[in-house]
């Protein structure tokens, strides 16, 4: 967590309505936002304070939170309730949803029980994207350019060498994807097991609203690679460097086509591997896991039959 003394000042108490109390700092994302616990009209709440430079993005996040909330209020799958938006002070207030992050929950389980607890995450995302899903002409070039730029910042030589093979593999796949259509929707945008809270049988998504309409399989790849980078592979079977059992859960939940399974999903798993660059501060164990995961992904991409 960043030093609170280095953060922008909080809104003056006089700028907050009655019943609003901002508490402890939870997280600071430099240049974007600070996130605090607190209470809003007697309810536990999350206060998201944006910088002036990201105020427009915050307004879009609020609109998305309000759009999706009525659709995501089931007994099993839901999102946090949007409580208030005060654009004049760059403040968005969300329900502080109860529960434990899914990744933390499964870490406490025996390996043979983890897959069953992870599988509902695929159904959660299916519910989220279903109301806005459609098909659009695939465009790989922008994703490839972003991935190539990211590889230039990789600080670990061993990973840099492996990533060259991954980039070559997804460039090869892109040649088969361009010209076809791929599935798009308004997605979560940062979909991973720590952004799903488990409370009994209920999964609540948090940190939604950061994405517009985008390829759905990018969100799926984000989830799979987030797990893989942390050494989480409940099925014990690896596919493109990620857990094959969890891949199968998404295949079933979304009824993925053959082209999606064989081309689009491997493409976005490769994109996801490359665009989130490791930092020197990571523990050696995380780097060793990355080497293993990326090498498996590179090798699978190299042998993938594109006929």
Image (cartoon, rainbow, N blue to C red):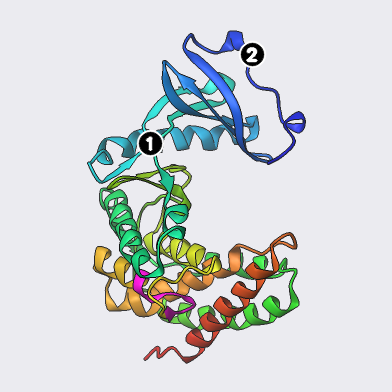
Residue annotated with mark 2 = 12
Quadrant location of the C terminus? bottom left
* Region in magenta: 238-246
Residue 243 part of the magenta segment: yes
Q: Nearer the viewer, residue 301 or 27?
A: 27
Whether residue 178 is visible, yes or no, is: no
Left or right: where 260 falls relative to 144: left
Q: Residue 236 vs residue 72: left or right?
A: right
Name the residue at 47% across, 12% down.
19
In front of the other: 47 or 151: 47
Compared across the picture, whether 63 is left or right of 151 comes to left
The answer to whether residue 167 is magenta is no
Residue 161's x, y, as percent? 69, 82
Residue identified by numbered label 1: 80
Q: CA distance from mark 2 to mark 1?
A: 26 Å
Q: Earlier in the sequence, mark 2 or mark 1?
A: 2
User: Which quarter of the figure has residue 119?
Assistant: bottom left
Residue drawn at x 54%, y 13% as measured from the top left: 16
User: Is residue 278 visible to us here?
Assistant: yes
């Amino acid at each position: 967590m960043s030093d609170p003394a280095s953060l922008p000042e909080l809104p003056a108490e006089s700028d907050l309505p009655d019943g609003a109390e901002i508490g402890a700092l939870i997280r600071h994302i430099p240049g974007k936002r600070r996130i605090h616990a607190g209470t809003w009209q007697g309810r536990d709440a999350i206060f998201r304070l944006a910088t002036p430079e990201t105020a427009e993005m915050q307004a879009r996040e609020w609109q998305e939170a309000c759009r999706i909330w009525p659709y995501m209020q089931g007994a099993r799958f839901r999102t946090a309730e949007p409580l208030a938006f005060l654009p004049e002070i760059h403040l968005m207030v969300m329900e502080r949803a109860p529960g434990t992050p899914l990744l933390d929950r499964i870490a406490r389980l025996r390996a043979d029980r983890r897959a069953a607890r992870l599988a509902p995450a695929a159904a959660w995302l299916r519910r989220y994207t279903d109301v806005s899903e459609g098909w659009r002409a695939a465009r790989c070039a922008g994703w490839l350019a972003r991935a190539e730029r990211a590889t230039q910042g990789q600080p670990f030589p061993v990973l840099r060498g492996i990533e060259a093979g991954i980039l070559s593999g997804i460039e090869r796949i892109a040649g088969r994807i361009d010209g076809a259509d791929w599935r798009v929707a308004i997605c979560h945008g940062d979909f991973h097991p720590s952004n799903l809270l488990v409370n009994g049988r209920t999964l609540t998504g948090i940190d939604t609203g950061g994405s517009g309409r985008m390829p759905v399989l990018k969100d799926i790849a984000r989830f799979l690679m987030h797990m893989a980078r942390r050494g989480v592979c409940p099925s014990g079977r690896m596919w493109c460097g990620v857990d094959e059992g969890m891949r199968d859960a998404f295949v079933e939940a979304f009824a993925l086509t053959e082209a999606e399974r064989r081309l689009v999903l491997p493409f976005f798993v490769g994109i996801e591997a490359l665009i989130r660059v490791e930092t020197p501060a990571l523990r050696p164990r995380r780097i060793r896991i990355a080497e293993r995961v990326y090498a498996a992904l590179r090798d699978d991409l190299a042998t993938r039959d594109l006929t």
